[in-house]
Image (cartoon, rainbow, N blue to C red):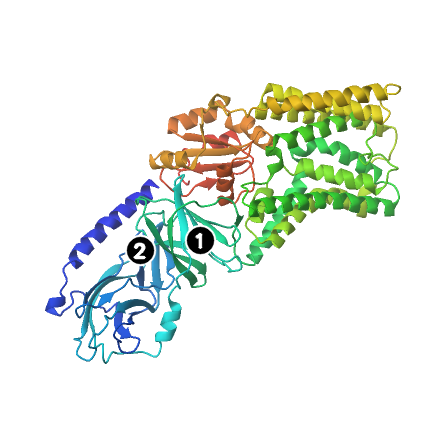
């Protein structure tokens, strides 16, 4: 950022000198200083002037070759806007020039707002009532503007005249009018918060946005080259742009480009801008990118089968796979039932996620684990399954030994997907991030592909007899294996209990553990695990369940994140903290984590929280920021979405020279992190 600011500063100095050269108007001398050889301009009217009416004039710019371009009123990081010096009859007045939708041109990291090829700027002129058009003197205009290529800029000027009674006209005037960005008939609202300009634009939801971009007319208000984010909220478009160095305006003037040269201009006033919405991507999606995302979702779901966070459900799947070694038709039915359960669960979670985001909720992948009561339910389920695997009782629908049909496989698939989907691994992160930006049908296809990848091993075993023959035959070993698999499920229950302590404190965790124990005892009593005492256990269990449940309502106190949890002493992530660190010219390492994300915890233990990394960061003056996404945080969710990430972990490295941030892999090593400060390529 510092490097970019320095370049922009030099451009500003040069342009200030250029403006000084152009400041004196030679109109009185009826001559130009620089001429218009590189960018010709002509003044054309839409018919003769009429008293008491608006008279539209056009400035038609024509570059001498395709390498030259002109500028919008706000040229961006570099360039110079047009200035017009009119000599008008007394009482005649000109309005603000009207421009077509500009184009983006990035040179050396600087964003310019330009026009390539011929373009037209319209200038409305108000003719007073009772004006004698026939006796009116000619109108004169001294126009100053800049013509540039990617390597050189040349000042241009022209003296133009037109007779109001007998003006030069052009049959193309109608098409020039059509090129001007039309004015939106509703006023938008804007707010400046968290280092960003947020704009709410009233825009019907059926307006297609193939490549949206917001061109802000207020000089230096925003960082022109920074990525912009767009989200639909009903008939409202929410735009967010990082702020620049300009002061807060009373009114915002902007052009919203839809892509393909189409767009609208609008005015916005300070007010409340809603949050949330469905992120906007290209209409119809980029098909090659979509197919890559689809393959990424499939591969990500497949890899979930070996991720540490998914290992506890392998107990259920392993026994189900062993059961599939029998009759071929039964194996296929079980495989399809299991796949149906997995895919349905992924589609349901994905559909709920998209629905919540469309309703304005800032949620991301694994949002269910950000709610304490969902975690309590998972703890109860994990405890009951642990007891089930240990042989205390049989849960109907979750039996994975032979004899219970496709219901068991379908239920196992539902459970596997629900427990596995909070994790994000290689390939999956980009795919889920894309799902939040694509149209609904394509997003659901990605969620379905994720489920298919998760179910693929079992599906292949069901349909490929050669693979089933590799499995050991069902027998007495299954009982022992089943009890062994109670261990990872029990560890899952302990991990959930630890998560509840991190989320709500000790009292809340104890209450949740009590509920889980009581429910398990009730199941054992009802399903025959505690013979002869079922009624007594049921009565006592229900009473305890109710008492503890009431007590937990008062026991939950959100636990604050502490910097002492890390040897890096990180500051909590905010976009303002990130902007301040980058503005100071220091490198920044940002990591987003959650207590329920086992991949995050593995990376922290194995790579981030290492003395070698701390020493390397301290030597280079690295600022560390940590975003804790354990509980729902709308600001973090919005930032993750802008980075194309649907969930955690996410690791970002911001070099000290202000270059673009680097998104690090989701599996870290100490050497990778310790080498970042000295890696001159980043």
Q: Residue 184 falls in which quadrant of the image? A: bottom left
Q: Which residue lies at the image location 39% right of the left edge and 68% below the top edge?
A: 179
Residue 503 x, y percent position in the rendering: 58, 26
Name the foreground residue: 128 vs 549.
128
Residue underneath mark 2? 74
Q: Is residue 268 left or right of residue 667?
A: left
Quarter that holds the N terminus: top left
Q: Is residue 96 left or right of residue 570?
A: left
Residue underneath mark 1? 201
Badge 2 or badge 1: first in the primary sequence: 2
Vertical position of residue 283 compared to residue 470: above or below: below
Q: Which residue lies at the image location 18% right of the left edge and 69% below the top edge?
A: 88
- Circle 2 — which element? strand
- Local crowd at mark 1 within 10 Å, few (<14), some, or many (≥20)? many
Vertical position of residue 196 compared to residue 103: above or below: above
Vertical position of residue 409 compared to residue 570: above or below: below
- Local crowd at mark 2 within 10 Å, few (<14), some, or many (≥20)? many
Residue 336 x, y percent position in the rendering: 79, 47
Q: Residue 311 falls in which quadrant of the image? A: top right
- Circle 1 — which element? strand
Q: Residue 37 falls in which quadrant of the image? A: bottom left
The reply to whether residue 391 is in sight is no
The reply to whether residue 379 is in sight is yes
Extreme-front residue of the structure: 130
Q: Is residue 446 left or right of residue 139?
A: right
């Amino acid at each position: 950022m510092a490097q970019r600011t320095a370049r922009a500063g030099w451009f500003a100095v040069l342009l200030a000198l250029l403006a000084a050269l152009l400041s004196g108007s030679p109109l009185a001398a009826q001559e130009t200083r620089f001429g218009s050889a590189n960018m010709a301009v002509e003044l054309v009217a839409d018919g003769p002037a009429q008293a008491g009416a608006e008279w539209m004039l056009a400035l038609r710019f024509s570059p001498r070759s395709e390498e030259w371009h002109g500028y919008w009123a706000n040229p961006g990081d570099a360039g110079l806007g047009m200035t017009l010096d009119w000599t008008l009859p007394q009482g005649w007045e000109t309005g603000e020039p009207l421009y077509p939708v500009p184009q983006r041109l990035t040179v050396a990291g600087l964003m310019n707002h330009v026009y390539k090829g011929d373009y037209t700027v319209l200038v409305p002129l108000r003719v007073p009532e009772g004006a004698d058009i026939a006796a009116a003197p000619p109108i004169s205009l001294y126009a100053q503007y800049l013509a540039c290529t990617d390597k050189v800029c040349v000042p241009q000027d022209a003296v133009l005249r037109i007779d109001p009674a007998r003006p030069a006209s052009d049959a193309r005037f109608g098409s020039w009018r059509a090129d001007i960005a039309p004015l939106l008939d509703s006023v938008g609202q804007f707010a400046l918060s968290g280092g960003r300009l947020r704009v709410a634009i009233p825009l019907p939801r059926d307006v297609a946005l193939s490549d949206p971009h917001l061109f802000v007319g207020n000089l230096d208000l925003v960082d022109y080259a920074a990525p912009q984010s767009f989200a639909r909220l009903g008939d409202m478009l929410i735009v967010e742009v990082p702020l620049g160095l300009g002061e807060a305006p009373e009114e915002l003037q902007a052009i919203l480009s839809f892509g393909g040269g189409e767009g609208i201009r609008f005015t916005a006033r300070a007010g409340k801008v809603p949050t949330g919405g469905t992120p906007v991507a290209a209409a119809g999606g980029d098909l090659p990118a979509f197919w890559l995302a689809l393959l990424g979702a499939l591969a990500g779901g497949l890899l979930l089968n070996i991720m540490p966070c998914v290992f506890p459900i392998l107990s259920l799947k392993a026994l189900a796979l062993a059961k599939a070694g029998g009759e071929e038709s039964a194996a296929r039915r079980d495989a399809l039932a299991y796949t149906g359960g997995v895919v349905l669960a992924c589609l349901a979670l994905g559909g709920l996620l998209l629905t919540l985001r469309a309703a304005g909720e800032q949620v991301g992948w694994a949002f269910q684990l950000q709610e304490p009561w969902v975690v309590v339910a998972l703890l109860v389920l994990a405890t009951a399954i642990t007891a089930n695997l240990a042989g205390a009782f049989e849960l109907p629908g979750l039996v994975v030994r032979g004899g219970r049909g496709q219901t068991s496989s379908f239920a196992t698939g539902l459970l596997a997907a629900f427990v596995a989907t909070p994790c994000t691994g290689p390939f999956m992160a980009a795919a889920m991030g894309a799902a939040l930006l694509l149209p609904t049908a394509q997003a659901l296809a990605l969620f379905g592909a994720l489920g298919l990848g998760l179910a693929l091993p079992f599906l292949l075993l069901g349909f490929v007899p050669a693979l089933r023959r590799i499995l050991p035959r069902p027998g007495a070993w299954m009982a022992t294996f089943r009890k062994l698999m109670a261990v990872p499920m029990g560890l899952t229950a302990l991990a959930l209990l630890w998560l509840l302590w991190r989320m709500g404190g000790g009292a809340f965790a104890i209450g949740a553990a009590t509920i889980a124990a009581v429910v398990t005892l009730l199941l054992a009593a009802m399903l025959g695990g505690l013979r002869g005492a079922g009624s007594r256990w049921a009565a006592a269990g229900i009473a305890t369940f109710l008492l503890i449940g009431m007590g937990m309502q008062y026991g939950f106190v959100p636990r604050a994140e502490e910097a002492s949890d890390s040897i890096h002493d990180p500051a909590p992530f905010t976009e303002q903290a990130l902007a301040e660190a980058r503005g100071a010219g220091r490198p920044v390492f940002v990591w987003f984590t959650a207590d329920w994300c086992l991949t995050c915890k593995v990376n922290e233990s194995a790579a981030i929280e290492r003395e070698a990394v701390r020493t390397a960061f301290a030597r280079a003056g690295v600022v560390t920021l940590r975003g804790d996404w354990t509980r729902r945080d709308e600001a973090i969710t919005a930032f993750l979405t802008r980075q194309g990430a649907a969930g955690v972990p996410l690791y970002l490295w911001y070099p000290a020279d202000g270059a673009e941030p680097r998104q690090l892999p989701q599996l870290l090593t100490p050497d990778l992190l310790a080498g970042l400060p000295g890696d001159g390529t980043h």
